[in-house]
Amino acid sequence: MWPLKSLDGISYRSGMAVARAFFFTGREHSGRNDPATLLEHTMNWDRVEGNWKQVSGKIKQQWGKLTDDALTQVNGKRDQLVGKIQDAYGVTRDDADRQVKDWESRNQ
């Protein structure tokens, strides 16, 4: 297993998230899916994870149907949050992802 080191200020974890995003979306490397945008987005969620107790209060205000147990399970992981929103509100994964993106843009 590779050590979880930082290379040029980019953590291994953040770099892998960018790689996964490209692999699973199969989208062009332009616009909102360029590496810099994805890396910035990923790094912001690294900060969210570190301040999860504070951020979870704002998330609870936005999505009141999410239980405290659900937020504890999310623990700052964006993909988990999208899944919990999908389950709690009965929306598609794309709709839940869009809601999280909108929330992110308002709470930067």
Image (spheres, helix red, strand yellow):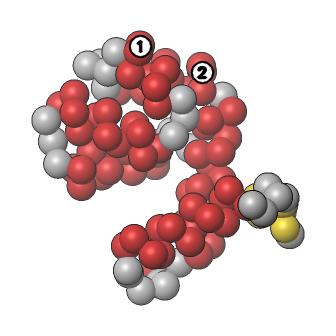
Tag 2 secondary structure? helix
Image coordinates of residue 70 in percent, x first then y, are 38, 22
Q: CA distance from mark 2 to mark 1?
A: 13 Å
Tag 1 secondary structure? helix
Q: Residue at x 62, y 35 (%)?
A: 49
Q: Residue at x 38, y 81 (%)?
A: 27
The furthest residue to the left: 90
Residue 58 seen by the camera: no
Mark 1 crowdedness (10 Å alpha carbons): few <14, some 14-19, many ≥20: few
- The amino acid marked with disc number 2 is Gln
Image coordinates of residue 69 in percent, x first then y, are 41, 15
Q: Nearer the viewer, residue 48 or 69?
A: 69
Marks 2 and 1 close (CB-CB < 8 Å): no
Side of 66 relative to 49 (left or right): left
Mark sitting earlier along the chain (2/1): 2
Q: Residue at x 24, y 55 (%)?
A: 94
Q: Label 2 belongs to which residue?
A: 54
The furthest residue to the top: 68
- The amino acid marked with disc number 1 is Asp
Mark 2 crowdedness (10 Å alpha carbons): few <14, some 14-19, many ≥20: few
Q: Nearer the viewer, residue 51 or 18?
A: 18
Side of 66 relative to 22 (left or right): left
Image coordinates of residue 64 in percent, x first then y, are 30, 18
Q: Label 1 belongs to which residue?
A: 68
The furthest residue to the front: 1
Residue 92 seen by the camera: yes
Side of 45 relative to 9 (left or right): left
Name the quarter where the N terminus is drawn. Answer: bottom right
